[in-house]
Amino acid sequence: MAYDFPDARGHFGPYGGQFVAETLMEPLARLTEAYARLKNDPAFLAELDNDLRHYVGRPSPLYHAERLTAKWAKNGGGAQIWLKREDLNHTGAHKINNTVGQALLAKHLGKTRIIAETGAGQHGVATATIAARLGLKCVVYMGAEDVQRQSPNVYRMKLLGAEVIPVKSGTQTLKDALNEALRDWVTHVDDTFYIIGTVAGPHPYPMLVRDFNAVVGRELLTQCPERIGRLPDAMVACVGGGSNAIGMFYPFLPHPEVRLVGVEAGGHGIDTPDHAAPLSAGMPGVLHGNKTYIMANEDGQISNTHSISAGLDYPGVGPEHAWLKDSGRAQYVAVNDEPALAAFHELTRVEGIIPALESAHALAYAQQMATGLGPDHHIVVNLSGRGDKDIFTIAKREGIELL
Ligand SMILES: *Cc1c(COP(=O)(O)O)cnc(C)c1O
C-alpha cells in the first residue's frame, strides 16, 4: 500500500479536505503553494535543522525504561519498554517541533504577526516562545473558560510577550478559540500567519503539522536499529488532535511489521458521555475545516468532551488518523482517567520521569500490551511531554492545596 497522502486537494481517502468559507480558500491555496516550494528549499531546510538541533535540543533520546520493564514483567508481562523523550524538548513537549517549523514558514513568507489557538495553553506557550525568538508579534486565542483554568500558562504567554485574547463564544473552550483564530486570519491575512497546534484544520494544515512532527519518527528509524538492533514490534502514542502520534507513525507507515497504536482519552469510559475518543466512539463528520471522526449528537451538534488531561480534550482528530483507522494500518484504543493516573505515578516513582498526563495514557496502554508479550518484544512509547504542568491537577485530586 502506498502512503503518500494527502492528495493535491488535501484528502486522506474520504477524509480531510477544505470545508471552509470562500474567503479562506485563497489564503489556504497560497499557503499550500508556498509550502510546496519551501519544503524542498535547501536554505529553509538547513535553518529548520539548525533550530531543531540548537534551540529545541534535538534529537531527543530513546530511553530504555529497564526498571519499569522489570516491574511490569513481574505482573506477567515482559516486553521491553522504550521511551522517546519528547518531554526533554525546549518548552517540555513535542509541540515546539511544529511551532518552530511553521514560524520559519511565516518568516520566509515575510509575515510579521503570528496567531494561534490554544486549549490548555501548551501550544500557546510554544507559539509565544518561538514568536519571541523571531521578534514576531503574537496573539493567542484561548477560550475564556480555559483562561480561568490555566492561569500559569496564560501568565507564561504574557511574559513571553504574547497577547492572550479570551474567547467568549460557544463553550468558551478550544474549539471556539480555533474558530476565532480562523476569523482573525481571514481579516489579517496579508501580514498574519496562523500556526495551528495539531493535525486539524483545513488542508494544508494536517500535512504541515505532520511533516514538522515527523522528525520524531525519522529519528526513531535511526535510533531503533542502533539501540534495539532492529525496528520495534509496536509503537504507542496518545491522540488528542493526533500530532505527536502521526509524527511518530508517519515514517513507519511503510514498515508493516511495526504495529502502530494510538491511544485516545477514555475519560470516565467510552460507554459514558464523558470522554474524548472520537475514533473509538465517534462518527465521521466535519469539524474545523476537515472531514474526520468527531464527537457529535444526531443533529451534528459537537459534544462536550472530558479527559483528565487537557491536551487530549478535543472532540475531533486529525483526518489522517481517520484514514489510518479505516485502512487498518493503525489501531486506536481508549484509556480512561484512572489507569492514566496510575501510569503517571508509576513512571514518576520507578524511573524518575514525571510524564504529562497525556503521555501517561500511552504508557498505560503499553503496560497492557506488555503483559502477554515476552522480553524479546520491544514497545516504543512516545513520551510527548513532561508533567510539570499537571502537578496542580494531581495535587487537587489528592486534596493538596499548592500555592
Ligand atoms: C497537546 C499535547 C498532546 C495532544 O496533542 P496531539 O496533537 O494529539 O499530539 C499530547 N501530549 C502533550 C504533552 C501535549 O502537550
Image: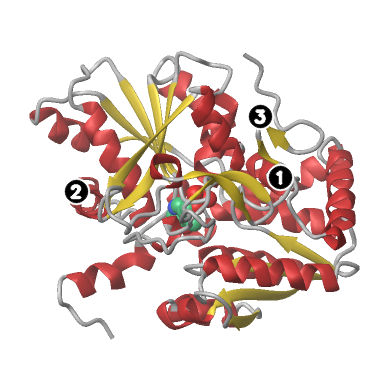
Residue 306 is situated, as x and y percent measured from the top left of the image, at: 36, 61
Q: Which amino acid does label 2 sit on?
A: Glu
Distance (Cα) linking label 2 and label 3: 39 Å
Horizontal placement of 372 versus 389: left or right? left
Above or below for 393 versus 221? below
Horizontal placement of 252 versus 269: left or right? right
Residue 203 is situated, as x and y percent measured from the top left of the image, at: 74, 46
Above or below for 193 versus 64? below
The answer to whether residue 112 is seen in the rendering is: no
Distance (Cα) linking label 1 and label 2: 35 Å
The answer to whether residue 263 is seen in the rendering is: yes
| Residue 279 location, quadrant | top left
Residue 69 is situated, as x and y percent measured from the top left of the image, at: 21, 32
Earlier residue among tags 2 and 3? 3
What residue is disc 3 on? 13
Q: State the mark number for residue 80.
A: none
Q: State the mark number for residue 208.
A: 1
Looking at the image, do the residues carrying marks 2 and 3 touch, with CB atoms under 8 Å apart?
no
Q: What residue type is labelled 1?
A: Leu
Q: What residue type is labelled 3?
A: Gly
Secondary structure beneath label 3: loop
Residue nearest the viewer, comparing 181 with 400: 181
